[in-house]
Image (cartoon, rainbow, N blue to C red):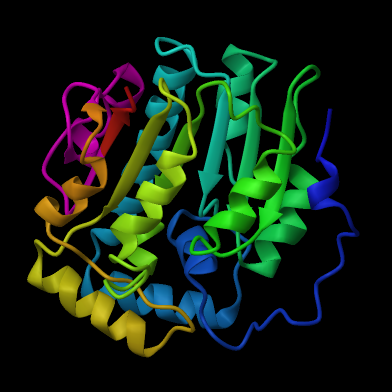
Amino acid sequence: MGISPSASGGASLPPRLDTSSAHSARVWNYLLGGKDNFAADREVGDMILQMFPGIAHIARLQRRFLGRAVRYLAGEAGIRQFLDIGTGLPTADNTHQIAQQLVPESRIVYVDNDPLVLVHARALLTSAPGGMTSYIEADVRDTGEILGEAAGTLDFSQPIALMMLGIMGQLPDSAGPSGPWSIVTTLLDALPPGSYLALSDGTDTSPALNHAIAAYNQNSASSYHLRSPEEIARFFDGLTLVPPGVVTTSRWRPDLADASAEPREVDAICGVGRKD
């Protein structure tokens, strides 16, 4: 099956697409070497690269973590459903491609609020036969809307993997009644036991990265909020962590495919936790 009705529509650029200001999904796409970005995104991306060249390495490591996490969840953990919030622009090895390669009947719901992501999702996020891939255009803070629409594709009586890579840093500490942690809690509360959270975000452990992100926030339509490793680890409160726990992104279950990138400390951490 292809895109579900929640992602219906044509593939023309939406009239409200603002290409004059940098957007996080498109800047990230540029840092990953993608082509789905505009001059404003490339300008900001180049500025960040000049101030903190390691940002491109962090971007690639996060993508590798996505692949390893999905392979673990679909393989060892037996997960057949994924709710991927903060999808970003489709590139190679998206969540549904990895999951459905292992388990063709896997069901994946993507969520993002960038209209350009929606255009590409309609065109590119096609599902394997027997599975389903759908797209919801929503803000991560709209938890009720996300959960309501996702129920059209996912069975909430069965375990679901909640994928939140690089998305919680998009929110300030003031988001939600108890900060962004309450948003993750709300989403996890709606999932049955046996579900998982996979999350990664950048840390405030590098003065150079802090400076680069501050400059990004002054030149982008969106903002990013680096947090301490301890603050990011709080998103996993109440969950059983999959070994090796919450670690720097390069050190979460590295495989032979990552041999060219020797694990080392980077200014981003990740983890996978199970809801019991």
Q: Relative to residue 155, is residue 234 drawn left or right?
A: left
User: Which residue is nearer to you in this view: 148 or 199?
Assistant: 148
Identify the image quadrant of the N terminus: top right
User: Which residue is nearer to you in this view: 134 or 42?
Assistant: 134
Q: Relative to residue 129, is residue 25 drawn left or right?
A: left
Question: In the rendered structure, does residue 246 fall within the stretch colored magenta?
Answer: yes
Question: In the rendered structure, does residue 179 fall within the stretch colored magenta?
Answer: no
Q: Is residue 165 visible?
A: no
Q: Relative to residue 31, is residue 213 drawn left or right?
A: left
**Location of residue 138 in the rendering, given as x and y in whole percent from the top left corner:** 62, 62
The image shows residue 28, relative to residue 79, as above or below, that is below
The image shows residue 160, relative to residue 51, as above or below, that is above
**Location of residue 203 in the rendering, given as x and y in whole percent from the top left corner:** 18, 58
**Location of residue 37 in the rendering, given as x and y in whole percent from the top left corner:** 60, 69
Residue in view at x 46 percent, y 61 percent: 28
Residue in view at x 35 percent, y 44 percent: 62
Q: Is residue 74 visible?
A: yes
Q: Which residues are magenta?
A: 241-270
